[in-house]
Image (tube, coloured by chain):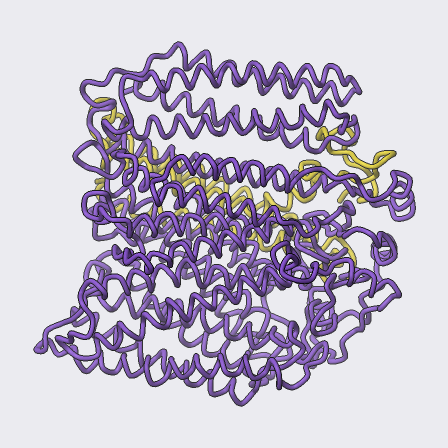
Amino acid sequence: MNPPRPTTPEPRRDTPATAEPATHETLDRLWADPPGLWGQLTAVQNDKIGVRLILTGFFFLLLGGSFDSVLMRLQLAVAENDLLSPQLYNELFTNHGTVTMFLVILPLFEGFAVLLLPLLLGTREMPFPRLGAFGYWTFLFGGLLYYSATLFSHVPDAGWFAYTPLSGPQFSPDMAIDFWVLGLGVAEVGAIAVAFEIIIGVLKTRAPGMTLGRIPLFAWSLLVMAFMILFAFTPLIVGSLLLELDRGFGTQFFNPDLGGSSLLWQHLFWIFGHPEVYIQSVPAAGIVSMIIPVFVRRRIIGYNWLVASVVAIGFLSFGLWAHHMFAVGLAPIILSFFAAASMMIAIPTGVQFFAWIATIWGGRPVWRPPFLFVVGFLVIFLIGGITGVMVAAPPFDLQAHDSHFVVGHLHYVLIGGVAFPIFAGVYYWFPKFTGRLLSERLGRWNFWLLFVGVNVAFFPMHIVGLMGMPRRVYTYDEGLGWGIYNMISTIGVVAFIVPGIAVFVWNVVRSLRRGEAAGANPWGADTLEWAVPSPPAQHGWTNLPIVTSRHPLWDQKDLASGDESLVSTARGLGEWPLRWRAAVTVGTADGRPQEVFRVADPSIWPLVTAGGVLVIFLGELSKIRWSIGIGVLIVVIGAIAWNWPTDPPMTVEEEAEFERKHAVPVNAGGSVVISAWATAIGILFVSIAFSSLLLSYFYLRLENAQWPPVGIPDPGLIVGLVAAVLVVAAGLMARWGMHRLGSDDRRGFLAGLASSLAVGGLGLSLQIGDVTEMAFAWTDHAYGSVFHTLAWFVLVVGSIALIMTLTVLFWGFRRLYTSRRHAAVANVIRLWTAAQVIWSIGFATLYLAPRLT
Amino acid sequence: MTDPERPEDGTRGAGALTGVTGTRYPVDASADRRARGVWVMLIGGPVIWFAHFMIVYLVAEAACTGDGPGMALFNPPVLEIVIAAATVAAALGCLLLIGRGYQSAAESRNAPGDRGGGDGNHATIYSGLLLSGLSLIATLFVAFPSLVLAPC
């Protein structure tokens, strides 16, 4: 529907230069992390965090992805092999799946995002550098905690999905599964933290003039990925919590004898597990959409269609989790819902494919390594996608389920669809951040070895799977005729894939020192990151670029002219401030600057807080439970210290001066806009967790004919009702307090908050008393387990609202807020609204639902 | 399209206004109305699809898995009625968005779009139009088997 536009047969090759004003050096120094070990521990710069995430992901790939798979392939190479014991084989496939799904691809893409987004979007930093650092540390700690199972010889062995009852206390009594649940739990916290950063980064911190329609496709993909992480990992955290409660505290969520349901775990796991596949393939497709136009010298065809596809995949992927459960005996109508949704996802994926092919068709390909990997991706991913549509049909799936056909399918998807684009991305962006190109010759070796290897290794699995070879079985009989296919697969891994990866590692190591110098834009690319020098300065951009096109480096003569007000802001920010790290937030849709805000400095507190998270999980793992309290204390202190308000490093007059000149307000005390966004997304996170618990409650309700079970009375109404009314009233009082502040009535403001605190505290205490006095314990029956867990969840949400109210009351006494500046108070009120709604729904579920039936 | 220079609603969103003398721009996300319109257009269809999917799935789960006192409420023909009603409502919602999207896409077609000035939201609205169409198809496709299959 776009108006016909003249197509540029050969996009401009000369990259518009960025201006280098005199302030460049000063800003570079200002944005650098401090030197030395202390500097490493306090570092928050996006380059550093991004590179760390990528390297850590790659480290886990070598450890869990490659090493395990080689051993497994050696074991399966011949029939009746006794190289590995069955137990070791169980541990290896569990570890291989777990590590690649949780600890490899996720940090790689989050690392790409943190590293690249500021340059790609034309801004100086991610919105929450300290949150990024926290995300990295928790991810690292989680990964190491998970891996430390090996040191204690308690290696998880229940598959990467840890199905109950195998993973429950009865069949896995030792600590192996605890390492799985708790180690990954820490890493999941990190993944969600970085997702916050990415969502707000893409939506709010972009170059002036970069409207939604001009966002690079990779950034769109990362935005969708981050939202999917939020929606998928949260149910998994809830599921892991329930599993750990079963294992460590004797609840009955997954115990069918006492009203629990092992299918509940499968639902919670796959609500995470299937979107996880798309969490990995969506950003991979984003990389492909970036690379194709550059290497075929043509604008991407169907930008709008690609954006729609990515968003569609993000949504549809949440409606097909049960296609992993086709064989568990769901009702046919339910199977057909999930089968329909699974097949629908082929439409947006197909649209992407046709857009890519059309772009290549209309262009003139340049066969450099990044493009080779993209073409490899198109071929292999297509095969994996089509076998995916096959297994989306329940009748076929019932045949192929749990066979090597599925192993073949998923490796075509994940290696073709995800690993190849990652390699393409590394070859493409390596020069930007190191200043050196990777070797072209080694790149070709790298590509061909992997391309041949993947097909040799995984294609025979389809055949042997259809012949009936099951997954996750450590050996097979001689006479079944599977030997030859397995031997071919093993040859593919050992003779092609391993050397392919070795060539890649050697290429990176060698090119770091001896690679050809790259220059700013070695590929003649179109997006903003190629306008800055390679490697870029610490702050990325001295003068923010002005974007007037989707392909700024191809279409714009320079990055400094455009709409007058935008130019004024961009120039202004190049000259002032020079003593604190300033960045700009823009309107979500229109890309116009909204405010100048101060980005956080290096700080040790993210590391301390991440350590606190680790202590919480370690306390549960080691069953030294009092240390959980210490962990919580560290997290609370760490979070408060990390967010401690500091005096704005300039005068109000200076702020006003900038605003008068450039018509953009300055908030050196902290951003109004992105803190509101962060609150909103935090509320979304809590709501998703709450919804997962609600679904668990009703799922268990459905599985039990009698609810509450025989012998347990309905919970008494009175106390719960009074508590709910008090909590709702407390929220209203806090809101009233803020309105008083709006009309400069400081006393009314403090009174409102104080009464909110008192009334809310009373409501909470009543509720705590009621829950602890209940006639049933959470170990008695799944009803008790879910009742108490849901009630405590609601109580925690209420407590958070109270703690936040206390904090703003404290700062209110110290006169931090005025009628004009009280963003923090507004955020607490938003939180109160969420707490009121969650509390009310929780009350209705816990106290009223049993009465209805 | 509103004038970006004009504050849209000076009193909205407490804690929202900032700056010594206030600012000409609304800086609260909730006050950014144009952004809100674009987002509704973009994800409205998929949200409708997802809501429909969850409703039909959960009601089917209640009808097929749940038994005991009170659960008979969901048994056929209630299940079929809920599926039919949810599907009609969702399809109407998608059609509404398609109509709206078609209109705004046509209106913004002549705007300078992503290469010139303008607000550059044409692309996003058009993506939203495509998504609404896909959501309509997906909603009908998900509901379709219930015409053929016995409920449980």
Q: Which of A452/A81 is in front?
A: A81
Q: Residue furthest top?
A: A718
Examine the rendered structure and indicate whether residue A574 appears above or below residue A204.
Answer: below
Name the quadrant of the C terminus of chain A: top left
Q: In the picture, one chain is purple; tell me its letter.
A: A
User: Which residue lies most toward the bottom here?
Assistant: A441
Outermost left residue: A479
Chain coloured yellow in this rendering: B
- Quadrant that contains the N terminus of chain A: bottom right
Image location (x, y in percent) of residue A7: 69, 75
Q: Position of residue A86 (x, y in %)?
A: 18, 65
- Closer to us: A531 or A611: A611
Q: Residue at x 73, y 63 (%)?
A: A540
Going by the image, does A244 lie left or right of A601?
A: left
Residue B115 seen in the figure: no
- Residue A606 percent across, percent down from the top left: 59, 48
Q: Nearer the viewer, residue B33 or A93?
A: A93
**A476 or A53, which lies in front?**
A53
Q: Is residue A798 left or right of residue A479?
A: right
Figure disc tally? 0
Q: Is residue A464 left or right of residue A341?
A: left
Image quarter of residue B33: top right
**A477 up-or-down from A42: above or below:** below
Asked where in the image residue A512 lies, by quadrant, the reply is bottom right
Q: Position of residue A585 (x, y in %)?
A: 73, 48
Q: Is residue A660 among what the camera can see?
A: yes
Residue drawn at 62 percent across, 16 percent down: A733
